[in-house]
Image (cartoon, rainbow, N blue to C red):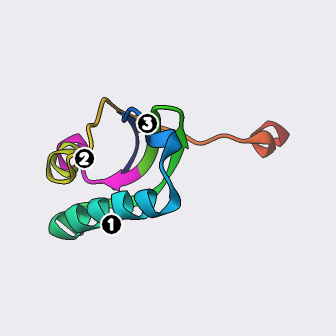
Amino acid sequence: MKKYVIERDLPGVGKMSGDELCGAAQTSNDALAQLAPRVQWQHSYVAGDKTFCIYLAEDEGAVREHAELSGFPATTITEIRAVIDPTTGAG
């Protein structure tokens, strides 16, 4: 499986209540259940009018399928090639 970051333009998402975010997550989970095991959601960051979601998927097409089923746009899909952090500099 490849790892992707999906940027979603979702006006107002940063102002959603906990209950509203719960409902959005359930909608996403329902779509994922239809696509399993081809797509897995790891987590998302909510920031202003966007979310940045980390997914494992067999390919970009599977990510796009999830976007269509869930109704959450996949504005930008980028494959993650590597992960670095402060310990990377330690060699």
Disc 2: which residue: 63
Seen from the viewer's position, the closer of residues 5 and 73 is: 73
* SS class, disc 2: helix
Q: CA distance from mark 1 to mark 3?
A: 18 Å
Seen from the viewer's position, the closer of residues 70 and 36 is: 70
Q: Could you tell which of marks 1 and 3 lies nearer the N-terminus?
A: 3
Disc 1: which residue: 26
Q: Which mark, residue 12?
A: 3
Q: Is residue 29 above or below residue 47?
A: below
- Mark 1 or 3: in front is 3
Q: CA distance from mark 3 to mark 2?
A: 23 Å
Q: Could you tell which of marks 1 and 2 lies nearer the N-terminus?
A: 1
Image quarter of residue 75: top left
Q: Which mark, residue 3?
A: none
Image quarter of residue 77: top left
Image quarter of residue 76: top left
Give the amino acid at mark 3.
Answer: Gly
Seen from the viewer's position, the closer of residues 17 and 61 is: 17
91 vs 27, left or right, is right
**Can residue 57 be found in the magenta stretch?**
yes
Quadrant placement of the C terminus: top right
**Can residue 84 be found in the magenta stretch?**
no
Give the amino acid at mark 2.
Answer: Val
Q: Is residue 43 above or below residue 86?
A: below
State which region is magenta. Answer: 55-63
**Quick one: label 3, few (<14), some, or many (20+) residues within 10 Å?**
few
**Quick one: label 1, few (<14), some, or many (20+) residues within 10 Å?**
few
- Mark 3 or 2: in front is 3
